[in-house]
Image: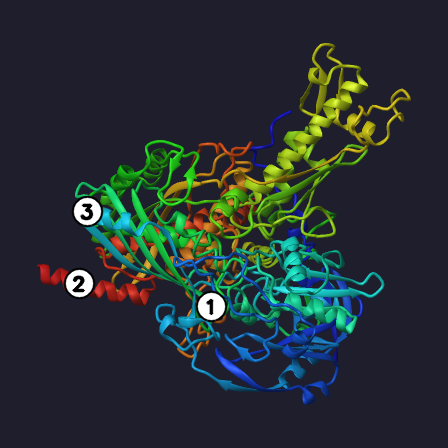
């Protein structure tokens, strides 16, 4: 049987999506359902003086209006930060309460203060207009850089500082800098982004009074985790009385990891009114209330020798958490950021210091890449600047500082098990025709255009997150994954995974893995996910973990099935289990060459005696049935890596940046389905290039979101991109049996510095902040003209 | 309230609906054709594209009453005898979709392109699809799928 792992298998999920049969949360309508509209704060910071719902209650079709008072009375808990971070001085991080409906204070535009539930959506909207809220508007804090100097947002949280965290050794870094021939320094803004999954968030909550169960359909990347948080911290219902279903989900990119106010409020309210409640975000609500990403202000320095050896690195960052710390809010700018700060280089001394601040803006949390794009942007912009200042070729300078052997013990935390960074660099250069660049630059010059080339070598820590590693860092819970492999008596297989697909293709790639492990045709394997009533507790999808953690759990459960199959076959064929081999779906007794198919074994496990002689095929100690579970907790992160190269052409008359070429050469370890991996790379690149050239979330000084629609926030479109040139090198991960590393975030991590290095190269080294809009670039072109004229 | 009469996917339908009912709402809520998606409410993202009398149109900013009497085709109406349309087949073959949310609008829009331009260049495809946002694919495989479909239609 040909192996499916490594093959371009068309997706099992596609037909329903292509024929309009996908079932997203907004497509779900329940009998007798009501509709919810949230009344939200129009102010970034205010105290609520009075909230009057009398008029609204009289509005046609209103079923109920609930406010922060009822939430508090019912002791419904708030949203939480999932990771505990300690400051450099040993103090615990400081997190404010975050009730699902604000009672006394609102802290960003969009913070909900009441929910209006009515018979129809139109009636709910009309009644919501009649809710009267009297606010005392307070001065908002919106600037990341100045947040520590602003008014105190949350009582008792001095300087709006959640924590002041350090990773690394300041003294060693000082010594390294003292020895340096040269110090390269850079100031960077990592622009705030809005994830913008195309499916707006939604939820439908239902209450069954007979079973006393709440069912919540929601747009989640991790339904089990949502249930846990809503139960343990939200006090919505005990876990066995709360079912969370994340059906087809239209993209997540991190924004659907969190449990949101609306999930908690609708679940709680459905029980209160004993009816189903449907809520679907309008896009403007998504802009205001989905978590945002990035938003760092960084000063970084690199100490180098004159021949280009890196000696030391320091990174001082202010990270904006927004109004509240949410699930991955505190870990994203710390443990997902700091350990990757030194990039793919051997740097003997380093530290990263992060001050995480609250502002009156939407909460900032994990967005595709989460911490690693910010880390990579800093080190790769710095290395590129170093190559300019030292006059050393940008690829040579990188190679000079790559690790020479693996495992590679990084400066700060990680031990990278495998990789070949030089091979990746050489292949990328070849793919991009790096040598031919100067000729192309001259061609552009002849047309009056400026051409630049940019390089990034990156690595990322994926497969989030091994318990042992997480606990040794003292920052929270480990994130294993579960799988249950269940044979039907007639030989088909259902695989339950705790992971969740919202575009990642689990139904196909996980089935490829199980098909190979079990020797069962792929069409006889179903992958089930996204429902807490089906399958075992699982952690969900983020941090490029689905395959590297969830996929391995499937492998391990399949291996347990095979082991049991061997024992059963041995009993059936009167052989020793040690003499039974398994290959391509058949158990073969090596000495006699007698065999049983895995289907026959499954049948025998469930219905002993029906087909064979009337005696049990089950060995002593084995129970009937054929079903195995695995909880896989990886021993280490996985470490994808690669080199990307971009070329841009700038029209100095207009400042327009045209991305001419983009080359990505990545090492993802073993690839399960090259078609799917290619799609993941393309999508990540589009988001990374979007950050570099187009996207930016902007608040004004009063805390109003200035980029709150697709007419103001530039989403990358089809005509913004060239055809991407994608290639791979491959070193297998040594820490998991498939040798896989993860591929979902690579593009979003590597593309911003790659493109910006190219833009800045074209601009003769002038710094431009992301996104490199025509206006900023045009101004830089004017400066360039002036300085060139002076030089002449 | 007014009477909306349409031919949707070859089937005549007649329903009472409030005058301000959007075509997207009429399809999704009144006819339960939930394959047409709402991604932005402002005519920007294109998840709601359907065909009205053969031309692509964003249904989230069109009143159902305004297209009264028209023939409407949605993503649910593309299959013939259980066989997918060549554009649907091409999207599957070339991985032109991931989460599937923008896909119905993208497919409907792409089919209209090929009705108007049988052999579009890459640039023409990218320009045409400028009104359909996809956050997952980076568009490359969508462009490839449209080219593939052009050879089959």
Q: Which mark is residue A180?
A: 3
Counting from the top left corner in percent of width and height, residue A42 is at 52, 80
Side of B71 where B40 appears, left or right: left
Which scheme is used to colour this image of the protein?
A: rainbow
Residue hosting label 1: A322
**Dot 2 falls on which chain?**
A
* Tag in front: 2 or 3: 3
Residue depicted at 39% across the width and 57% down the height: A88
A369 and A197: which one is in front? A369
B127 and A225: which one is in front? A225
Marks 1,2: beta carbons within 8 A: no
Badges 1 and 2, same chain = yes
Rendering quarter of residue A760: bottom left
Residue hosting label 2: A785
Q: Decide which of tag 1 and tag 2 comes sooner along the chain.
A: 1
Marks 1,3: beta carbons within 8 A: no
Q: Which mark is residue A368?
A: none
Residue depicted at 27% across the width and 57% down the height: A186
Q: Quadrant of the N terminus of chain A?
A: top right
Marks 2,3: beta carbons within 8 A: no
Q: Residues within 10 Å of mark 2 (few under 14, many from 20)?
A: some
**Dot 3 falls on which chain?**
A
Q: Real-space Cα distance between discs 1 and 2?
A: 40 Å
Badges 2 and 3, same chain = yes
Residue A272 appearing in the image: yes
Side of A141 where B18 appears, left or right: right
Counting from the top left corner in percent of width and height, residue A684 is at 47, 50
Side of A105 where A496 appears, left or right: right
């Amino acid at each position: 049987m040909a192996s499916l792992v490594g093959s371009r298998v068309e997706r099992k999920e596609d037909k329903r999506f292509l024929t309009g049969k996908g079932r997203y949360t907004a497509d779900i309508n329940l009998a007798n359902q009501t509709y919810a509209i949230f009344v939200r704060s129009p102010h970034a910071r205010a105290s609520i003086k009075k909230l009057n719902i009398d008029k609204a209650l009289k509005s046609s079709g209103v079923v109920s209006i609930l406010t922060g008072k009822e939430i508090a009375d019912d002791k419904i808990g708030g949203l939480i930060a999932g990771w505990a971070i300690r400051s450099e001085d040993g103090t615990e991080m400081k997190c404010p309460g975050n009730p699902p409906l604000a009672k006394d204070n609102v802290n960003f535009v969009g913070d909900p203060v009441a929910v209006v539930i009515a018979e129809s959506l139109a009636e709910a909207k009309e009644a919501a207009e009649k809710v009267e809220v009297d606010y005392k508007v307070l001065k908002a804090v919106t600037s990341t850089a100045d947040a520590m100097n602003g008014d105190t947002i949350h009582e008792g949280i001095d300087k709006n500082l959640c924590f002041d965290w350090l990773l690394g050794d300041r003294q060693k870094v000082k010594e390294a800098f003292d020895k340096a021939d040269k110090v390269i320094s850079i100031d960077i803004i990592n622009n705030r982004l809005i994830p913008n999954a195309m499916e707006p968030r939604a939820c439908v909550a239902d209450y069954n009074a007979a079973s006393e169960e709440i069912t919540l359909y929601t747009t989640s990347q991790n339904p089990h985790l949502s249930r846990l948080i809503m139960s343990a911290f939200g006090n919505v219902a005990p876990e066995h009385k709360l079912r969370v279903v994340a059906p087809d989900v239209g993209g997540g990119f991190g924004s659907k990891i969190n449990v949101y106010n609306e999930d908690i409020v609708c679940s709680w309210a459905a029980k209160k009114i004993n009816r189903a409640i449907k809520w679907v975000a309008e896009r403007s609500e998504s802009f205001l209330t989905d978590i945002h990403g990035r938003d760092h202000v960084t000063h970084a320095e690199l100490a180098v020798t004159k021949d280009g050896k890196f000696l030391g690195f320091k990174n001082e960052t202010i990270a904006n958490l927004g109004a509240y710390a949410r699930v991955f809010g505190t870990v994203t700018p710390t443990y997902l950021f700091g350990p990757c700060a030194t990039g793919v280089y051997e740097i003997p001394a380093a530290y990263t210091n992060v001050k995480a601040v609250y502002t009156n803006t939407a909460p900032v949390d994990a967005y595709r890449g989460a911490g690693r794009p910010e880390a990579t942007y800093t080190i790769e912009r710095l290395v590129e600047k170093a190559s300019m200042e030292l006059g050393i070729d940008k690829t040579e300078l990188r190679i000079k500082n790559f690790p020479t052997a693996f495992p590679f013990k990084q400066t700060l935390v990680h031990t990278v098990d495998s990789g070949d960074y030089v091979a990746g660099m050489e292949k990328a250069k070849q793919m991009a025709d790096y040598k031919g660049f100067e000729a192309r630059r001259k061609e552009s010059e002849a047309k009056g255009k400026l051409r630049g080339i940019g390089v990034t070598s990156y690595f990322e820590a994926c497969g989030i997150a091994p318990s042992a590693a997480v606990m040794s860092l003292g920052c929270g819970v480990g994130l294993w994954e579960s799988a249950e492999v269940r044979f039907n008596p007639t030989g088909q297989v259902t695989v339950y995974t705790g992971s969740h697909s919202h575009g990642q293709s689990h139904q196909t790639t996980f089935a490829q893995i199980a098909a190979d492990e079990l020797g069962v045709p792929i069409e006889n394997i179903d992958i089930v996910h996204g429902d807490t009533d089906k399958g075992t507790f699982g952690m969900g999808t983020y941090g490029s973990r689905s395959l590297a953690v969830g996929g391995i759990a499937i492998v391990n459960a399949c291996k347990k099935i095979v082991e049991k199959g061997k024992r059963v076959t041995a009993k059936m064929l009167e052989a020793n289990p040690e003499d039974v081999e398994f290959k391509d779906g058949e158990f073969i007794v090596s000495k006699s060459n007698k065999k049983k198919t895995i289907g026959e074994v499954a049948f025998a496990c469930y219905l002993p005696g029906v087909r064979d002689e009337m005696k049990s095929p089950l060995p002593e100690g084995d129970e009937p049935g054929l079903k195995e579970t695995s909880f896989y907790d990886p021993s280490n992160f996985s470490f994808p890596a690669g080199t990307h190269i971009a070329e841009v052409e700038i029209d100095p008359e207009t400042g327009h940046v045209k991305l001419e070429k983009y080359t990505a050469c990545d090492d993802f370890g073993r690839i399960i389905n090259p078609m799917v991996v290619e799609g993941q790379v393309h999508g990540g690149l589009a988001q990374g290039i979007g950050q570099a050239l187009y996207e930016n979330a902007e608040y004004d000084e009063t805390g109003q979101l200035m980029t709150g629609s697709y007419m103001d926030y530039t989403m990358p479109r089809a005509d913004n991109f060239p055809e991407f040139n994608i290639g791979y090198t491959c070193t297998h991960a040594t820490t998991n049996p498939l040798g896989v590393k993860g591929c979902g975030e690579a593009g979003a991590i590597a593309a911003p510095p790659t493109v910006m290095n190219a833009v800045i190269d074209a601009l003769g080294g002038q710094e431009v902040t992301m996104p490199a809009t025509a206006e900023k670039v045009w101004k830089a072109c004017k400066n360039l003209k002036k300085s060139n004229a002076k030089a002449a | 309230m007014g009477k909306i009469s349409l031919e949707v996917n070859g089937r005549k339908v007649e329903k009472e609906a409030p005058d301000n009912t959007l075509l997207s709402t009429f399809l999704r809520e009144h006819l339960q054709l939930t394959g047409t998606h709402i991604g932005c409410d402002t005519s920007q993202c294109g998840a709601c594209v359907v065909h009205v009398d053969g031309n692509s149109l964003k249904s989230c900013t069109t009143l159902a009453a305004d297209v009264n009497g028209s023939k409407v085709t949605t993503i649910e109406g593309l299959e013939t005898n259980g066989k997918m349309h060549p554009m649907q087949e091409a999207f599957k073959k070339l991985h032109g979709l991931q989460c599937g949310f923008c896909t119905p609008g993208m497919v409907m829009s792409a089919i209209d392109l090929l009705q108007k331009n049988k052999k579009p260049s890459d640039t023409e495809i990218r320009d045409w699809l400028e009104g359909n946002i996809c956050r997952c694919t980076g568009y490359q495989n969508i462009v490839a799928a449209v080219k593939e479909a052009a050879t089959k239609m």
